[in-house]
Image (spheres, rainbow, N blue to C red):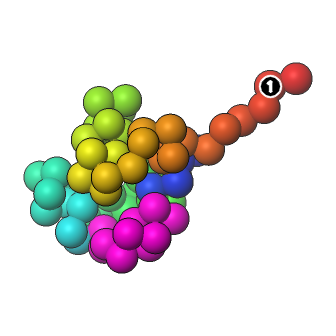
């Protein structure tokens, strides 16, 4: 799971803005934001750079027992 949607809101950016910056469709960004699909590690790093956040802020930790 990722926190792209939350981070976009915090940074006052839209899915459209991110799609334009990355050269992706808004549909792709929407799927990432709804966790229906996940960006690659490289794409996550690009998103982090565009939003000026640490890439770790885009990933929800999951605890494995």
- Residue carrying label 1: 64
Quadrant where the C terminus sits is top right
Looking at the rendering, the stretch of residues picked out in magenta corresponds to: 5-15
Residue sitting at 42 percent across and 39 percent down?
A: 55
Q: Position of residue 31 (x, y in %)?
A: 41, 56
**Which structural element holds mark 1?**
loop
Front position in the image: 13 or 22: 13
Q: Is residue 47 above or below residue 29?
A: above
Mark 1 burial class by Cα count in 10 Å: few <14, some 14-19, many 20+: few
Residue sitting at 39 percent across and 49 percent down?
A: 53
On screen, residue 46 versus residue 41, left or right, reads left
| Residue 8 on the magenta span | yes
Residue sitting at 32 percent across and 37 percent down?
A: 45
Q: Position of residue 62 (x, y in %)?
A: 71, 35
Tell me which secondary structure the magenta stretch mostly adopts: helix
Residue 38 shows in the view? no
Quadrant where the N terminus sits is top right
On screen, residue 17 versus residue 52, left or right, reads left
Quarter of the image for residue 42 reads: top left
Front position in the image: 16 or 8: 8
Q: Is residue 7 above or below residue 64?
A: below
Q: Is residue 65 above or below residue 34?
A: above
Residue 34 shows in the view? yes
Residue sitting at 24 percent across and 52 percent down?
A: 50
């Amino acid at each position: 799971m990722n926190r792209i949607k939350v981070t976009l809101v915090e940074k006052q950016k839209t899915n459209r803005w991110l799609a334009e910056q990355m050269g992706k469709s808004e549909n792709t960004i929407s799927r990432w934001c709804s966790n229906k699909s996940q960006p690659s590690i490289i794409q996550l790093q690009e998103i982090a750079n565009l939003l000026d956040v640490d890439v770790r802020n885009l990933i929800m930790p999951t605890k494995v027992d």
